Structures are given as structure tokens and as C-alpha cells.
Image (cartoon, coloured by chain):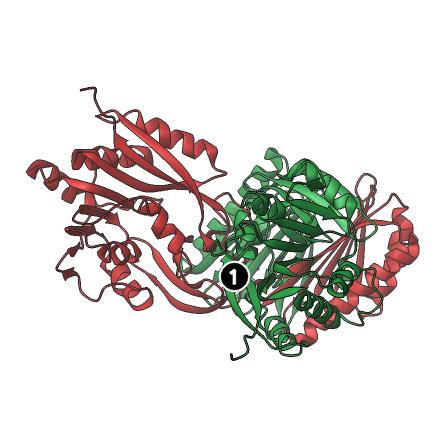
Chain colours: A red, B green
Amino acid sequence: VAGWRHPLLLLCLTDCNAVLKALQPIFQEQGMTETVHNWEDHGYLVTYIKKNGSFANLRIHPHGLVLVDLQSYNDDMKGREEVDQLLNKVEERMKELIHGNIKRVKRLPAILRGGVIDRYWPTADGRLVEYDIDEVVYDEDSPFQNIKILHSKQFGNILILSGDVNLAESDLAYTQAIMGSGKEDYTGKEVLILGGGDGGILYEIVKLKPKMVTMVEISFDKWSLIHINLNVLDNLKGDCYQVLIEDCIPVLKRYAKEGRMFDYVINDLTAVPISTSPEEDSTWEFLRLILDLSMKVLKQDGKYFTQGNCINLTDALTLYEEQLSRLYCPVEFSKETVCVPSYMELWVFYTIWKKQTNI
Amino acid sequence: VAGWRHPLLLLCLTDCNAVLKALQPIFQEQGMTETVHNWEDHGYLVTYIKKNGSFANLRIHPHGLVLVDLQSYNDDMKGREEVDQLLNKVEERMKELIHGNIKRVKRLPAILRGGVIDRYWPTADGRLVEYDIDEVVYDEDSPFQNIKILHSKQFGNILILSGDVNLAESDLAYTQAIMGSGKEDYTGKEVLILGGGDGGILYEIVKLKPKMVTMVEISFDKWSLIHINLNVLDNLKGDCYQVLIEDCIPVLKRYAKEGRMFDYVINDLTAVPISTSPEEDSTWEFLRLILDLSMKVLKQDGKYFTQGNCINLTDALTLYEEQLSRLYCPVEFSKETVCVPSYMELWVFYTIWKKQTNI
């Protein structure tokens, strides 16, 4: 395991050379081998290498920014204390040098790399976030994707599909949002779930006494494993539900041909489409194919629910909405922003329905 | 601005020397000055320094972990593309070398340091999280603390007090939780708010037709500035509310002496206590003083609400609960875990009430 610490010290304008002279002894007394690099425009970069493999670099920028990075092998308590002591000394020395006139001091938590447990799962909008992962519950490649279940202290088991945080045990908010946020009456209704392999939606809807829920999930592996970890029904078939382990495209086509209609279609497919169907040339065409087929099996007064994207990816949301104007039938939609605890970013959910023609 | 990229490449066991030979040309052809360090136990550390001030270091661990860190001055598009291209080459070369047999490849988003906007606000449990901050709205020191208002694209304005994320415009969930999660009837009630300087609680309770809400907030600066940014009432006094700009300790003592009683006491003071009162020797004693005084002004069937801590700081939560058994009167409590959007961690809220004596 290699641990990193990123303290950031922002100072008022001061002499680079004076900063270097003040900080050098701190590293030198650690018995580190020093190499000093100097640029006219960019100030100093000093590297320090220790016999035990530890490595530090110190940047002194001419406009008053001092950066210290430490790289070490061990993240044990002793190693952490040593790092903290060294950084305390750097801070003290800088305060002495410029008489407490430091504008900003910041230490960032260490980044742990190369360990068995990976705690860094960036958000959909590309921000770095660290999760409180303490256990790898499952990590396998299915024919369709990489499937991880990691345990988070606060969120419970988190399902991560090909690197995307999909759903955690804490995320009933996701399931409620994609079911229409409690505003729908599922009693006696025909419901079609596309995807939904974690079983959360099926589990919640079955409680609401629907006539029949059909869930179409491509990946049996996923189903069977989630099964162990989330509150999924024990059997693939019950009085008011059935689970089909199939690609949803041919199933939708079959239903469309048979004239089978649903009150609700819930699209809970992964963001990156998985299909054995050859028709999709691109993600958007695939999305539109699913939407068109779904509208064909949706009753005139039915509703289609789906998750969209994180609220910050406005371009992707706009593109999605443009697809909605290109379906075979005119539709209308509304959207809602929801906080799904394990996502660390707000998420947009869509409700789509067929435009009612004037009587 | 100094940008950092942290790709992480995990490989199967392979020869360190072969990895070094494969990767060296990628950096060398960038015109970087190379220094190779070698340890028997720790493999290689190679540093690369470019004329423009960029810096890279490559670690090749004997057990098959390869780490690349890049440090550059510019985070413009051109700089980012160059970094991506370099990392792509490293990845390709590694795949060629070990024939695609790479166990894990991970690139972390760049860490931006030294910019005007600081995007890194670690959670209470010490995890590194990056916020989507795009503007510094306010940044000043009051006599009591540093007050920042930073704008987040998704959470709106975020109030950060001495480095702690306090509340954002997205966080009605916080206000609802500390008001009893919608289970209380505030109509005609006497309410005391301790702290609450962002005005959210006052704003929400006034809508519920209380008899009188008294809010005691120490920091007028804070009040006046939040005022601009969150939905706070325009005046410090209205038909059913008043705001006292005072330390809450002497106010509580005065009320206790006068025998003034409240149906609800809501403690929304900051986690790190601010007081002009000399009595508190420690945080816990201060907390207990507030609790004892609050119980003195709480009606026998009244309720005391407060925020506790993040769910992962179990020791702090236990210590808090121990304080509750040491008050002048016996109390009982319940707690609830709530997802406050801008916190990036689950938060525990307490409801405390006086133990009812048997009739």
C-alpha cells in the first residue's frame, strides 16, 4: 500500500529562496537524499528520497504557493504519525518565516493506492470521492460486465457495475424515485421492469398488490448474486410476479407483436447499454429503440419511469430529452431531482407519458 | 494552479526491470530529465522533470504495482490532453508487456491545488471528497470563526464554518430532521432555537403558526450575510418570532431564572462550541451545560432536538449519549439517521425528552 498526503500551504508573497532555506533542514534531518531543481519562472522543485523507499517532493512557487507531497509504503499508525509530525514542522517553520501571515493551509487526507480495497469511485460528473469501503464482498466478471459488491460502513453493500456505483442498501430513495415517488397506485396494475437486477424495485412493487409484475433482466449472474445481498424475492416466479432472464429487446418486440400492454414500464437498465441485439449503432439509438418499443407496450394512460443522469451533466440530459421528441409517438415528460445517498451527487429521474390527443 | 493525476496500474507479478525498460521511452521522448532510484525491497522510483516545470514520478513495486503521478502547472484543455495521452501510452505499453493480463487499472481525477477555489472539503469521518464548487461567494473571518459561502453547481450556496460544511441550499432534509421530521405540531407552541444562524429553521417554523419562536444566535455577521443567501426572514423581529444576537448561555440562564418554559428547544449550534461564557472547560462540559440549561427551560412534555454527528464516528456518538445520562434530570432519547445532500455522509439527529415519572 502506498499512502499519499497532500498538504497545501498558501502564503503571501515571499522569497522562494528563503522558503527553501527554512524547509530544507526538516527533510534533511530525516536522512533523506535531496535533489534541488530550479526554474526561473517556476521556482523550486526539491525531491527527497529515504532509504526505506519513502519519497517527498516540495514545490515552492514564485507566487507564494508551497506544496508538499509525501509517498510512503506503510499506512500504519506509526507511519501516519511520522507524516503528521513532518507536516506539522513544515507548517510551524512557514509560520515563523512569514510571521503567521499564511493565507491558507490545507492538508488533504492520504490517498491509498494498490490495496485490496479500492475506496475511490469518482462521481458521474468526474469528481474524486472516497467511500468508506471496508470489505470486498464480491468481484467477478460476468459475460456482460464487471460486478463488484463492496461494503460501505454507512451505505451497506454497494453494487458497482463496470466501475459505476449502481445502488447501495441505503438507496431506497432511488427505488422510490424510479417508481414515481409514491404518487402512483400500483394495485391491480400490469408492470414491466427492464433491468432492475438488484431486485429492489420488484421487491417494493410486489408489496403494493399489483396484478402482475414482469421483470426482464439479462444477467442471471447478477441476479443470483444480488439475491444474497439485497432484499430480493426468493423465487423467480410468484403469484403476481415473474422474472425473465433475457435480453429485453426481443421480449419487448414479442409483447408489441402480441399486443400486450402495461400500465407502467420502469426502465432500470444500466447507463451503458448491455444488449445482445445487433440493431443499436450507438448509445442514443439503443436508448431510442428501448423507448420506442416501451411506448408500443405502454397503455395510452400509462407511465414510463427511468433514471436519467447526474444533475451536472446537463448536456447529456438535454440530449436525452431531444431523443424523446424523436419517438414514433408524441410524448410528454417531467423530471425530478433526487438525492440517492451512495451517489454523492444529485440524480435526475424522468416520467414519460404519451401525449393525450384532443377528444 | 498545480494539477495532479493519479493513475493506478495493478499488474500480475512481473519483472520490475522489464517494466522499467518498457515505460522509460514514453517519458524520455517527452524530453524529460530522468533519475532512477532502486531499492532491493521496494523496486524502482524514477523521477522525470521537464523544462516547463512539469514533474512525473513512476513507481514500480516488486509485487506488481505500478504507480504514475504527474504534476503540472496548467490545467487547461491542452495540458489535460497531454496528460491523458501520456497515460494512455503507459497503459498500452503495460498491456503489450504482460499481454493484457492487467488485474486493475485506475486513473483518479486530477487534484487541483493552489487555485482561488478550493474544491476539497473532507467529510467529518476524514474521507477525501471533491465538491463541484464554481464560485467563492463570501470568505471572511468573524470574531468567532471563518465564514465561507461557496457556490456548488448542484447544492447551491454552501455555508462552510471554519472548514466544516454546515448547510447548503439543497439541505432542507437537515432542517426537517432537526425540527422532528414532520412529526411535530408547532401550532401555538413556544420554541427556542439555539444558534441556527443560517435562518433555515426559523423560516420553516414561522410557516407553521407557532405562538413565539425565539432564536439566539451569537454571530451577527453570520446572520447578516446568510440573510443575503438563504431564505431568511427580512427582520429580526416579527409577530411570532424574535432573533436575539447574544451568546445563548446567559440567555438560557436568564430564562431558567425567570421560569420561562418552551415546548421545543432546538439546538443548532456548531459542532465546535462558540461561547463567550467562561464556564466550559471542555467541549463535553460545554455540551452538558447547554443540555442542562435547556432541560431547565423545557416543559415536562417538551422536546429537545439536535444534530449529533456523522454515522461513522460511533465513539463520538457514544460519548454524547453518555453525557445524556449525566444531566440534572433523567432523560430519554431517540435517534434518526438522515441523508443531508451536501454532507456526502449520513448524519445522526437526536430527540431528547424528560423521563416521565410514574403517576
Kindly indicate the quadrant of the structure image that contains residue B152. top right
- Would you place residue B139 above or below residue B325 in this image? above
Farthest-out residue, top: A358
**Nearest the eye: A205 or B256:** B256
Residue located at (21% from left, 67% from top) = A234
Task: List x then y, in percent, for residue A81.
Answer: 72, 72
Task: List x then y, in percent, for residue B44.
Answer: 62, 64
- Would you place residue A39 above or below residue B181 in this image? above
Residue located at (45% from left, 31% from top) = A315
- For residue B338, side relative to residue B268 (left or right): left
**Nearest the eye: A325 or A38:** A325
- For residue B337, side relative to residue B224 (left or right): left
Kindly identify which residue carries mark 1. A119
The N terminus of chain A: image quadrant: bottom right
- Which three-letter amino acid code belongs to the residue tagged 1? Arg
Residue located at (16% from left, 49% from top) = A188
